Amino acid sequence: ERIVKLINSGISPIFDEPMIPESVKHYVSIGMFKATTDLVEASRICEVKFVAVPTGIVDGKFNGVHLEKALRGIGKGLKRGDAVCVECTVPPMTTETLVKSILEGESGLKVEEDFALAFSPERIYEGRALEDLEVRYPKIVGGVGPKSTRFFSLLYRRIAKRGVIEMSSARAAELSKIFEGVYRDVNIALVNELATLCSTYNVDFFEVREASNSQPFCHLHKPGVGVGGPCIPVYPYFLLESADRVGLRLELTRLARSINEGMPLKTVSILREIMTELGLTPSETVVAIFGLAFRGNIADSRGSPTYEIVKLLLHMGVKVVVHDPYISFDSTLNSLGVTLTGSIEKAVEGCNVIIVATDHDYYRVLDWRRISDLMSSPKIIFDGRGIVEISSLPSNVTFIGIGRPKIKL
């Protein structure tokens, strides 16, 4: 209700997306945009409905509770001539089975005869949503039948400057979105393994990566302390669950997810070894983690590997402080008794270890010599995102990281 009141007064609850605040203010003022908590009424007064609700996993299984709730409300207000498009990521066959069944059951109408139904995945990157939708990518559309595909294809062509890719079915469109995420997850798992090998040889993975990627058919991603967010760590499970239902085991997809989920533990294990080498006991060690957000330059911590790293360090008996320039409060860290601060000085004062866990641009330009002066000896800097310039480090620290050479400066 709070968000609805904000929107209807012309104030966007989303303030960090370019053009969104201005658009909300403008279209509310001219009566073309309105928010409501009454889903059935909203469905009754609108002819075209887009469904973009959170989906996720519970114990490795698809959780569509928000989707089902939205569909039941839409179905109760559905009329002949209406059109419904699902944009949230779902397992293959969801639009043609679950979505179709609920809408037809609640409305008494028939898809393709009385209303259109399609799947068109959202393909946006937080921080540039409108640009991605309108300019960067073609829109993918797959209907439950040709009429549905055609309707939404014509509609999206008015928005997406890169055009529309018409798929043969809704399930094909669903798979296209999942494959995007699984490809990235598998690629990241690969580079996490290669980065481990590079560290064993005391070679900088990022140097090797740059050379390898100069070949146009090589697209090595970047390794790190883990894969976070609401998308990449989730989509493989949609695929694995669907494959299991039809008797297939997607071994590579499963293994990649396991590797990436294990990166926080690998991070802490590497750190523990270095601490032992330097004679640091957990009880006397303070670790400052740079970054709570799951990726750089955003204030979103969903699925962040920092949470798991924090828990593992606390279990070791280490004191932990987290710094993030974009996030001022976090209930999970608060419940763990961990300080979250926006002050870099407060975070590093007296600490022995710094883990760079998020690739915020803020961390790329730090004065490491000044930071080192605030730390306690022995000093360890762990680069978990490949963004620390070794040449910028002072001469009294031990430098390590994911895919970085171990250097005692």
Image (cartoon, rainbow, N blue to C red):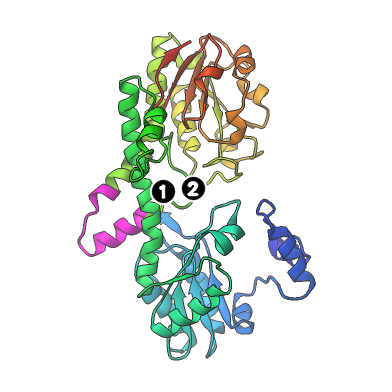
Say which mark, if any, is on residue 229.
2
Query: Crowding near pointer 2: few (<14 within 10 Å), some, many (20+)?
Result: some
Q: Residue at x 38, y 59 (%)?
A: 178
The residue that disc 1 covers is 233
Q: Residue at x 28, y 48 (%)?
A: 254
Furthest residue in direction front, as rendered: 215
Q: Residue at x 41, y 55 (%)?
A: 57
- Is mark 2 in CB contact (under 8 Å) with mark 1? yes
Q: Position of residue 149 (x, y in %)?
A: 44, 79
In the displayed structure, 333 sits above or below 138; it is above
Give the image quarter of residue 95: bottom left
**What's the magenta region?**
236-253
Q: Amino acid at mark 1?
A: Pro
Residue 168: in magenta span: no
At mark 1, the secondary structure is loop
Q: Amino acid at mark 2?
A: Gly
In the foreground, 76 or 354: 354
How many angstroms separate mark 2 from mark 1 (CA)? 7 Å
Give the image quarter of residue 211: top left
Q: Residue at x 38, y 38 (%)?
A: 214
Classify residue 161 as left or right of residue 252.
right
In the displayed structure, 288 sits above or below 154; it is above
Q: Main secondary structure of the magenta part?
A: helix
Q: Position of residue 304 (x, y in %)?
A: 50, 41
In the displayed structure, 270 sits above or below 42; it is above
Q: Position of residue 388 (x, y in %)?
A: 52, 25
Classify residue 43 as left or right of residue 151.
right
Residue 103 in sight from this viewpoint: no
